[in-house]
Image (cartoon, grey):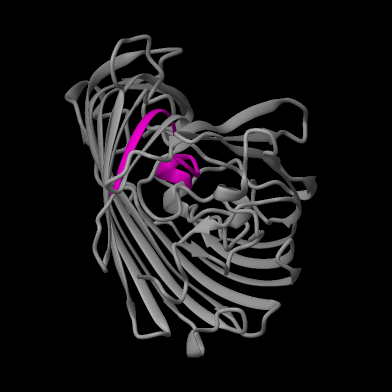
Amino acid sequence: MFKIFGLCSAMLLCQSAYAAGNESAFNPAFSLILSGTYGSLQQDPATPATGFAMNPNPVHEQGFNLGESEMGISANIDPQFRGVATLALDPAGGVSVENAYVQTTSLGDGLKLKFGRYFSGLGYLNEQHAHAWDFVDQPLVYAALWENQLGEDGVQLKWLAPTEMFIELGVEAAKGRGFPGTERAKNGSGAGVLFAHIGDDIGIEQSWRAGFSLHRTRAVERSSDDVPDLIGNNVSTAFSGDNRTAGLDLVWKYAPHGNLKESYLKLQGEYFRRSESGELSYDTAGANITDSYAVTQSGWYVQGVYQFTPQWRSALRYDSLDPGIASVGAANAGNVIADYAFQPSRTTFMLDYSASEFSRIRLQLAHDSARQGLPDNQLFVQYLMSLGAHGAHSY
């Protein structure tokens, strides 16, 4: 299965001869990813996409900026377990834990258990670290619905079917610490994920993978600031209720004669649809009026990446969001905007150069129409450099 691209894609940055099997408890693989950007934007990046002010807004940085450095350590612990830790070094100071998990290596029957902190297996892009993205930023739907990525503290169980066709099923039980949920002091699981992936080769030159994901969690007093209301004020709100998201993803890859080192084409797309229902408190610092609230929001993107020489790639991506039409309780019908009648979108072009598998320089141009009446032409220059051993990324 996946004869061209394998279960680890060599087309992504920082592929290494160090595989998990070459790590040991006495000689762990160590890596450091250095990154930085220059950003030129016409609009204030703190302004959220229209209709998504109650969702997170991961902002772009303007001017010269040191990006988040990423330090990774991984090793086999013993014949039964392997450990992985990824630490994010903030340019302003401080260290945060992106991943810190243990994986089993000997359950057999295609089963693999992961426990600790990890990026969820939902969708296609969610498990990829920032240095492996094909663009400077995530698609709008990931930024708006997942705050770029869904990270969890919990347990994940995957099963790889013993078939010629790639079939993978997974389930997660987690704390629900990040958006769209809220961290709560409770026993048991605060969030759950189900996902399924299938894929196969088409001859020696093509392969594909499709997936389906379900996510559920609950928010309690999830606060949002600077949310516009019907009379033009920006207020604070708080939402408590249930959150359910379904997603679809599809990836197709082509390499002439099966030689992806020379050139390849990768097409991918994802769609997520989220429904929230519960209670919304309007203007928590003032009127503090609480009534029922429900909304279904969605988003999707499609993109293509073309490596036309061993060192040069270009890519094009289109993003779109739908803020939906909210159902607002009578007490807040004159306060909370129900229908924004606008769909945010963005078109992005990327060109990058990799002198080797350990370095990449990228130029990105985007026309951002995510904010009604505030079109933004954006330019970014980015560098990504890898030091040390860095394991291959998934398909």
Image-based side of 45 in relation to 127, left or right: right
Q: Using the rendered view, name the quadrant where residue 28 is placed.
A: top right
x and y percentages locating residue 182 in the rendered image = 39, 22
Q: Is residue 52 visible?
A: no
Figure quadrant of the C terminus:
bottom left
Image-based side of 10 in relation to 267, left or right: right
Q: Residue at x 57, y 69 (%)?
A: 11
x and y percentages locating residue 138 in the rendered image = 52, 53
Magenta stretch encompasses residue 151: yes
Give the tally of numbered discs.
0
x and y percentages locating residue 56 in the rendered image = 48, 36
Image-based side of 238 in relation to 351, left or right: left
**166 vs 251, nearest the viewer:** 166
Figure quadrant of the N terminus:
bottom left
Q: Using the rendered view, name the quadrant where residue 339 is placed.
A: top left
Q: Measured along the vertical axis of the image, is residue 108 above or below residue 240?
A: below
Q: Is residue 248 visible?
A: yes
Q: Residue furthest right?
A: 64
Magenta stretch encompasses residue 3: no
**152 vs 207, nearest the viewer:** 207
**251 vs 11, nearest the viewer:** 11
Q: Residue furthest bottom?
A: 257
x and y percentages locating residue 153 in the rendered image = 43, 26
Q: Which residues are magenta?
A: 143-159
Image-based side of 99 in relation to 42, left or right: left
Q: Measured along the vertical axis of the image, is residue 154 above or below residue 257?
A: above
**254 vs 4, nearest the viewer:** 4
